Image (cartoon, rainbow, N blue to C red):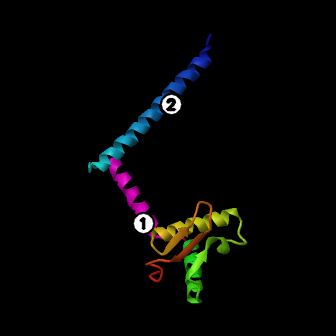
Amino acid sequence: MLTTDESGYLQELDCSEAERKTDNDLFALTAWNSSNGTVNGFGETLELETENKDNEEIKWSKRTLQLLKTLQHLNKSGVNSFSLQELCQKNNRKEVAVKFYIFLVLQKQMVVELVQRAPFAHITATAGRMFSAH
C-alpha cells in the first residue's frame, strides 16, 4: 500500500521521465531539421555550436604547439623519427595520455605520420607533409 508521500514521489518520477523524453525528442528534432537544412531557433544554436567545434580544431593548445616545437628542434638536430616511449620517459600517466592525444591531433593535421607495427607495440612518429608548415 502506498502512502500519499510515496505516490507523490512516483508522480514526480513519471513527470521528470516525461520531461527527459521531451528534451531528447526536441534534440533529435533539432538535429534532424538542421541536417535537412531547415533552420529554426534551435537549429541556429546547433549550427553555431558546430562552427565553434570546427574553429576549436584549428586552434591548437599550448601543449600541442610546445610538443611540435620540440619535435621540430629534434628534427633539425638530425632525428628523423620520434618514439612516443622516449618522449614520455619521465612522465606520469596523465602526461603520457596527453602526449599520445597530441600525437593523434598532429597526425590528423598531417603534421606527423604515426606507425605502430603491432598492437601494444611502440608508437613512432615521422615528419608529415605539414611538418614544416607550422
Quadrant of the image containing the N terminus = top right
Task: Give the residue pinned by disc 1.
Answer: 55
State whether the magenta stretch is mostly helix, strand or loop.
helix
| Residue 92 x/y as whole percent | 71, 65
Residue 60, can we see it?
Answer: no
| Residue 52 x/y as whole percent | 42, 61
Q: Nearer the viewer, residue 62 or 117?
A: 117
Task: Give the residue pinned by disc 2.
Answer: 16
Provide the secondary structure element on which disc 1 rests: helix
Q: Which residue shows up at 58% across the image and 23% down it?
A: 9
Q: Amino acid at mark 2?
A: Ser
Q: Nearer the viewer, residue 108 or 124?
A: 124
Q: Which residue shows up at 52% across the image and 70% down it?
A: 114
Q: Is residue 52 magenta?
A: yes
Residue 9 in the image: above or below residue 2: below
> In the image, which residues are magenta?
41-61
Q: Amino acid at mark 1?
A: Asn
